[in-house]
Amino acid sequence: MLRRYPVSSWGGHARRHRVFLCVVLAGAGLRGLVMLGYRPALWFPDSYTYVVTALRPRPDLVRPAGYSVFLRLLEPFHDFAAVALVQHLLGLATGVLVYAGVRRWGGPAWAGVAASAPVLLDAYQVQLEHLLVSDTLFMFLVVAGVYAAARTRTWRGAAAAGLLLAAATLTRTVGLPLIVLVTLWLAFRRPDPALGVRRTDPAEMPRGVRRAWQALRRSGSRLRPRGVQAAAVCLVAALVPVGAYAAWFSATHHRFGIVGANGVFLYGRTMSFADCAVMRPPPDLAVLCDDTPPDARPPSQAYVWDPGAPLPALPGITFSASSDRLAGRFAMLALRSQPLDYAASVLGELARGFTWGRPVYPDRETYDHYEFPARTPAPPSREPALLGVTLATQEYQRGPIGTRVEEPFAGWVRAYQDVARLPGTLLLLVLLAAPVAAAVRRRRGGPWVLPWATAAALLVIPAATAEFDYRYVLPAVPLAFLAAALAVTGLSTSPSTQKPHLPADSMHNG
């Protein structure tokens, strides 16, 4: 049963969080202008594939179907504006989760407002929400999963975290390593009085479990029994839906996985440095070599999508099982032969996200998709997108799907985008703030660790396995700011003296 609060109580909450509410209202107004200026939504090359999978359910070789399921759930509205609206609401909800996380751990209101402002007010974040791509949904699911894991006190919280991370994984494959990360964090985290966690008495354990536990303790393990329970629940809750999707994928494509393009994308990644004179590949792999000097080569994605690139030029389908295996073998040979070149390449890709400006990358066409346009974008000309256009027009929207640019609202939004963005250099400083604050205060661990590690993983994994892209950076931003707010403010107070803002009837668990 929902608890009823008197009007005076709601008024007290509003006064206590009035600055944050003003920021949320500003973010909502900004999103309203975007919806008025660009109707019904903005399209990206990937959007059409998502629509095809939504209306013709079948696991795609390149992208998991989570976002397509999201589109299918909203299909009864027959309006892509409804999709954009829900994505904008998810963006606002992500900001609310960041603020709630700071306040939940006893941080001051100003820190919560500062941490949530980038996701609520950044122009490129709002533009990404208006694009028909998976990143906004993925960002919300990851932030919600981390929030659930960080504050869990019951097995239900651990299960919720696992399910949210599973949904994120089936939306973007970069979510899969996050399941491992969160599971390990749950297993090894320290009990924190701010969450009402109590230590488990070994006498409460069954005899066999107690003996195993005592052996682990004697070996120096930092595992904690309640943490292990939470980690196991989270892992099972995550792997069941991911495993079910992998079974569907296997039944369709006759190979186990959630996508069938890992080898192809890793091949494209290694082509930024791969030197066949150093690798000395066997003849079957040598066909994938490129004699162009690495410094003169195009971005990694060209080796996946450009018809003239070595892999797409081979007979057959680029993402067939044989092509993916061939590309994967080449990539692994490149990694073994040139590990230092690979590390330098990954660091170079990471550095692109930390520049003060916003240089064009990976190409002008992709870059322009992240800017609010001044005129109606041209329809796609690539053949793979044409089926998506047909289905989107005839079945989903049941009308024209082209973006209409409506002035003066669109002009106001473009002017805002010219000045309201998060510089990459500031993001780097925010990422460094949490570990530096922990080191200065000589505190090991803390509530900042999980969001910080997740943000770092979201930045590193795409740079290591695919390439840098501006839209891959934005899902890491709310977690990076949450971690910084918790480390800089929360670590100044012992957890036992913090005001955790918990309800009086909260349950205790690990």
Image (cartoon, rainbow, N blue to C red):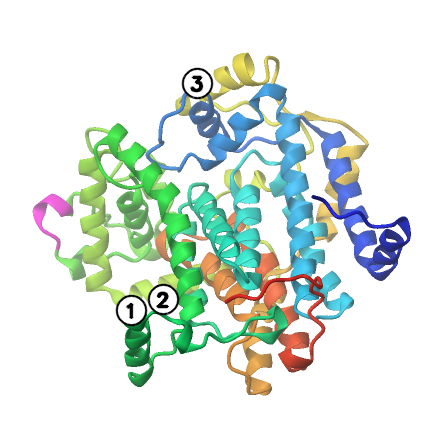
Q: CA distance from mark 1 to mark 3?
A: 43 Å
The residue positioned 46% from the left and 36% from the top of the image is 66
The residue positioned 35% from the left and 50% from the top of the image is 297
Disc number for residue 344: 2
Identity, as a three-letter code, of the amino acid under mark 1: Leu
Identity, as a three-letter code, of the amino acid under mark 3: Leu
Element marked by disc 3: helix
Residue 359 in percent (x, y) is at 56, 53
- In the image, residue 353 above or below residue 329: below
Residue on which the image places disc 3: 387
Q: Are marks 2 and 1 in contact (CB under 8 Å)?
A: yes
Q: Of the residues under marks 1 and 3, which one precedes in the sequence?
A: 1
- In the image, residue 453 above or below residue 139: below
Element marked by disc 1: helix
- In the image, residue 221 above or below residue 158: below
Q: Is residue 164 left or right of residue 304?
A: right
Residue 51 in percent (x, y) is at 48, 25
- What residue span does the magenta drawing correspond to? 281-285
In depth, the one of 173 and 504 nearer the eye is 504
**Magenta stretch holds residue 284:** yes
Q: Of the residues under marks 3 and 2, which one precedes in the sequence?
A: 2
Q: CA distance from mark 3 to mark 2?
A: 40 Å
Evaluate whether residue 360 shows in this view: yes
> Quadrant location of the N terminus?
top right
Mark 1 against mark 3, which lies toward the viewer? 3
Q: CA distance from mark 2 to mark 1?
A: 6 Å
Evaluate whether residue 463 shows in this view: no
Residue on which the image places disc 1: 340
In depth, the one of 468 and 164 nearer the eye is 164
The residue positioned 45% from the left and 65% from the top of the image is 186
